[in-house]
């Protein structure tokens, strides 16, 4: 079992930056899980943002955030991060951290464990 807790959300002006953190606990985290970040706005489906492989050697991003967001992980600290730069109002959403013992993909259904989410609001 894995528990995930996100933090770092908040209100920022357009063009600003935020760093989201995801703390993992429970079963040994380090090399056992691919990790992903997703986001969801009211009335919309949960949307893929980024994913990172177990040792951080592979990362993938949604086209909408490529070049602005960076996913990283520190397995020694059981942490995953999402650095978000050049934020836009359309980035406003609840952001979720997710873990899978399989291969992380773009599909939310591929992930077994989820955090409770952290809210990001980008003011125009």
Image (spheres, grey):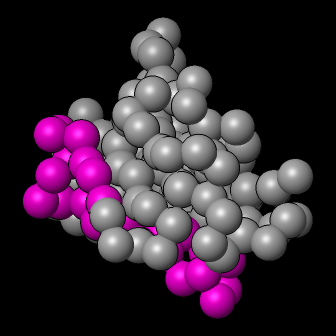
- Residue 79 % position (x, y): 61, 75
54 shown above or below 48: below
Left or right for 101, reference 40 = right
Q: How many marks?
A: 0
Q: Residue at x 62, y 59 (%)?
A: 33
Q: Residue furthest top?
A: 43
60 shown above or below 108: below
Q: Residue at x 38, y 34 (%)?
A: 106
Kindly indicate the quadrant of the structure image that contains residue 28. Answer: bottom right
Quarter placement of the C terminus: top left
Whether residue 76 is visible to the viewer of this picture, yes or no, is: yes
Q: Residue at x 47, y 45 (%)?
A: 104
First to last magenta residue range: 59-84
- Residue 68 % position (x, y): 17, 59
Left or right for 101, reference 15 = right
Closest to the observer, 1 or 80: 1
Q: Is residue 15 magenta?
A: no
44 shown above or below 103: above
Q: Residue furthest bottom?
A: 76
Left or right for 20, reference 88 = right
Whether residue 40 is visible to the viewer of this picture, yes or no, is: no
- Residue 114 % position (x, y): 69, 42
Q: Residue at x 24, y 41 (%)?
A: 62
- Residue 1 % position (x, y): 87, 52
Closest to the observer, 117 or 53: 53
Closest to the observer, 122 or 113: 113
Left or right for 82, reference 34 = left
Kindly indicate the quadrant of the structure image that contains residue 58. Answer: bottom left
Q: Is residue 83 magenta?
A: yes
89 shown above or below 26: above
């Amino acid at each position: 079992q894995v528990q995930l807790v996100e933090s770092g959300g908040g209100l920022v002006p357009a063009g600003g930056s935020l760093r989201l953190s995801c703390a993992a606990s429970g079963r040994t985290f380090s090399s056992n899980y691919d990790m992903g970040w997703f986001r969801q706005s009211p009335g919309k489906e949960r949307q893929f943002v980024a994913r990172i492989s177990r040792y951080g050697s592979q990362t993938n991003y949604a086209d909408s955030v490529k070049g602005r967001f960076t996913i990283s992980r520190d397995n020694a600290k059981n942490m995953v991060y999402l650095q978000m730069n050049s934020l836009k109002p359309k980035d406003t959403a609840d952001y979720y951290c997710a873990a899978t013992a399989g291969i992380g993909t773009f599909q939310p259904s591929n992930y077994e464990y989820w955090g409770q989410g952290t809210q990001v609001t980008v003011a125009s």
